[in-house]
Amino acid sequence: MRVALFTETFLPKIDGIVTICCLLLDHLTKRGIETAIVAPGRGIERYNETRVIGVPNIAFPLYPEIRVGPPTPNTYNQLKAFQPDIAHFIHPILIGIPGMLMSKRLGIPTVASFHLDVARIAHHYNLGFVEPGIDFMTRLVFNSADAALAPSRLIQQDMTRIGIENVGLWKRGVDAKKFNPRYRNAEMRDRLTQGHLEDTLLLYVGRVSAEKQVDQIKAVLEQVPGTRLAIVGNGPAREQFERHFEGTNAYFAGYLQGEALSEAYASADIFVFPSALETFGLVVVEAMAAGLPVVASRVGGVRDVVQEGVTGYTFDVNDAQAMVEGVRQIAVSRARIEQMGKAARAFAETQSWDTMMDEVINLYADLIAEKQQAISA
């Protein structure tokens, strides 16, 4: 089997979508499946065993870390030479939509998975007038694929609501070896708490942008004594949020990768996630795997993974007071933090990436078989 993956964002950028792409490519390679990925060209020609077909691109003005640009005839020629059996589109937009047309021309089945709620992001940035148009295009593109996948039950419902048909689930897993309480590290905790090791360390990991609403965590620092906040990640709103948290117990750590990221998770006490928009929220289950109880807004897959009062607490988007109360109930004692953290870890251990990825491979095989049967009929 040969699989072509199309994505709007890839290395060296680091975010949830890139993480999913890399995990999928790694798993396909492990299963002996040949892969190629069509992505914005950033000088990377290979990712492990996967060939990268780079697309010419420029920086997106509103978010320079994002590179945009459409495929070219050369992209099609390279794709054709690879001779894929199936194409998987990681939320098709500027690269994915032309890529889907290329795949149709090659006569191969297509899978489109939902990763970014562009319409609701536009609404969040006061561009709600474009929502109907984005929903129309999303419906058109996903219904033109042979299979559509949602990352969570909430997004599955949203996709169905806007008219996407036969939406399947491709849930998210976690690497319980990489994200593990054993990475708890005194030096990392000292860094993230700025020398206040005995305080309750709240952690946020992810993009530092307006829709993540990290600024709301300031209410917790103000109302729950003995709490500190470490913000891991970067993004367009960092300077704005740094001004917002000036004079508080907040520390901006920037991007962390590899073992340093594992240590950051494991060295904190409570994961706090007030995001307004998510399709899943991969960082939530990563934090749980590291042994952290979670206090998170009810977005994406949060309700699928957090058990109220056992592994954490959830709250309605923008209900900052409920977020404060959730943290307060966990931070009441070190024993409470540890008890809920152990429960979070136990749940995360059941969320294997291998199982989630094998389900996608089985879908690939079914679609390829159906296409071959249709041709021979």
Image (spheres, rainbow, N blue to C red):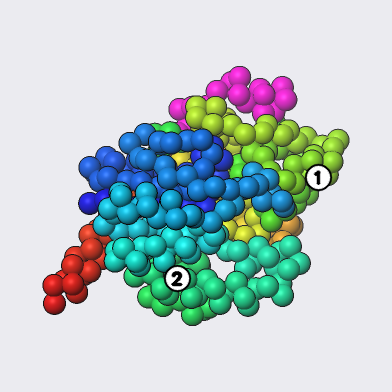
Residue 356, horizontal then vertical, whole percent: 34, 53
Above or below for 125 versus 215: below
Mark 1 surroundings: few (<14), some (14-19) or many (≥20) residues within 10 A: few
What's the residue at 50%, 75% (across, down)? Answer: 139
| Along the line of sight, the residue nearer the viewer: 257 or 219 | 257
What's the residue at 37%, 34% (across, down)? Answer: 48
Label 1 belongs to which residue? 240
Tell whether position 193 is magenta.
yes
Dot 2 falls on a residue whose secondary structure is helix
Above or below for 67 versus 136: above
Query: Which quadrant of the view contains residue 87?
Result: bottom left
Closer to the camera: disc 2 or disc 1?
2
Query: Which quadrant of the view contains residue 45?
Result: top left
Predominant SS of the magenta segment: helix
Residue 288, horizontal then vertical, whole percent: 49, 44
Residue 268 can be seen, yes or no:
yes
Q: Are marks 2 and 1 in contact (CB under 8 Å)?
A: no
How many marks on residues? 2
Above or below for 43 versus 364: above
Label 2 belongs to which residue? 142
